[in-house]
Image: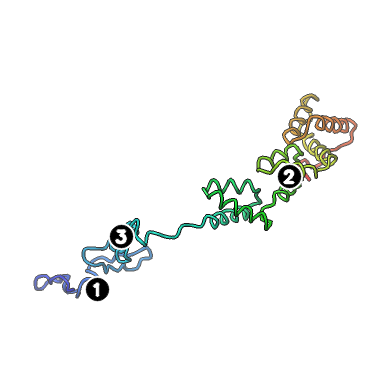
Amino acid sequence: MTGPDPGPAGETGPGDWGAWPDRPEPGPARTGRRGGRRRRGVPEGGGGSGARDEGRGFPPDGPAEGSPEGQGPPADPQAVARAICLRLLTMAPRTRAQLAEALRKREVPEDAAEAVLERFSEVGLIDDEAFAAAWVSSRHTGRGLARRALASELRHRGVDEDTVKEAVEQLDPEQEAETARRLVARKLRATRGLEPAVRTRRLAGMLARKGYGPGLAFRVIREVLESEEADDPVVPDDPDLPFA
């Protein structure tokens, strides 16, 4: 292809730059993001994204619907289910019910979801018994939760009733009572100066939110308050001492 005709004699026209478009037309240099000169070797009548797409063999909007290029093998439902479960288990331990709900929300076919969940259970990647036992130990030690609150949390996560019962029974009643005493001792200093009935109500409310029954709660509160009146401190000198 030859370039446009040169201008009148004595003038410099585009024709003086040789064959178009191998060389740019004269004028201010156009720069890209890094400040370099942008090449303009675009065929005549083109230059848009459509031209580039046509160069790759596809129309501007991608492969036509129904064409061989627009069709691919359908995703394997079990492969999708495995990927979802592995990603969730990498983030945090999950119960079988939690994983099943996640697969349902992703519209994984029920038979594929059940096959993957069963396989994960066989190899130990899903273990509701171990999950429940670890949950009880961790939440009681870290948050001071009683058996009633722990059982409620496990049920909410889809653990079956027999597994819940077995897990919370590992928590010794005396250990639960000792944890309640420590919780009351930590809260006691913040209630000083209040009426005895108000102090008792606030301390009992705190224990109730953590799952302690009224019988244990009021017994522990009475013991701690009596110890305080007898000048036998049960509150740590440092009120910010973390709960153990």
Q: Amino acid at mark 1?
A: Asp
Q: Could you say which disc has been placed on residue 239 in the image?
A: none
| Residue of label 2 | 163
At horizontal 17% and vertical 74% (from top left) the residue drawn is: 2
Q: Which residue is mark 3?
A: 59
Relative to 153, is 18 on the left or the right?
A: left
- C-alpha distance separating marks 1 and 3: 26 Å
Say whether residue 127 is left or right of residue 86: right
Q: Nearer the viewer, residue 21 or 193?
A: 21
Q: Is residue 72 left or right of residue 94?
A: left
Query: Is label 1 in a helix, a strand or a loop?
Result: loop
The residue at 15%/70% (across/down) is 4
Is residue 29 or residue 165 the one in the foreground?
165
Amino acid type at circle 2 is Thr
Q: Name the N-terminal-most of marks 1 and 3.
A: 1
Across and down, in percent, residue 62 comes to: 34, 58
Relative image position of residue 55 (x, y in whole percent)? 30, 66
- Residue that carries the numbered disc 1 in the rendered image: 22
Q: Nearer the viewer, mark 1 or mark 2?
A: 2
In the rendered image, residue 167, in percent from the top left (x then y), is placed at 76, 45
Report the number of discs.
3
Nearer-the-camera pick, 206 or 104: 104
Give me the residue at 84% from left, 33% from top.
Answer: 220
Tag 3–tag 2 contact (CB < 8 Å): no
Quarter-of-image position of residue 199: top right
Examine the image and state in which quarter residue 200 appears: top right
Q: Is residue 67 above or below residue 95?
A: below
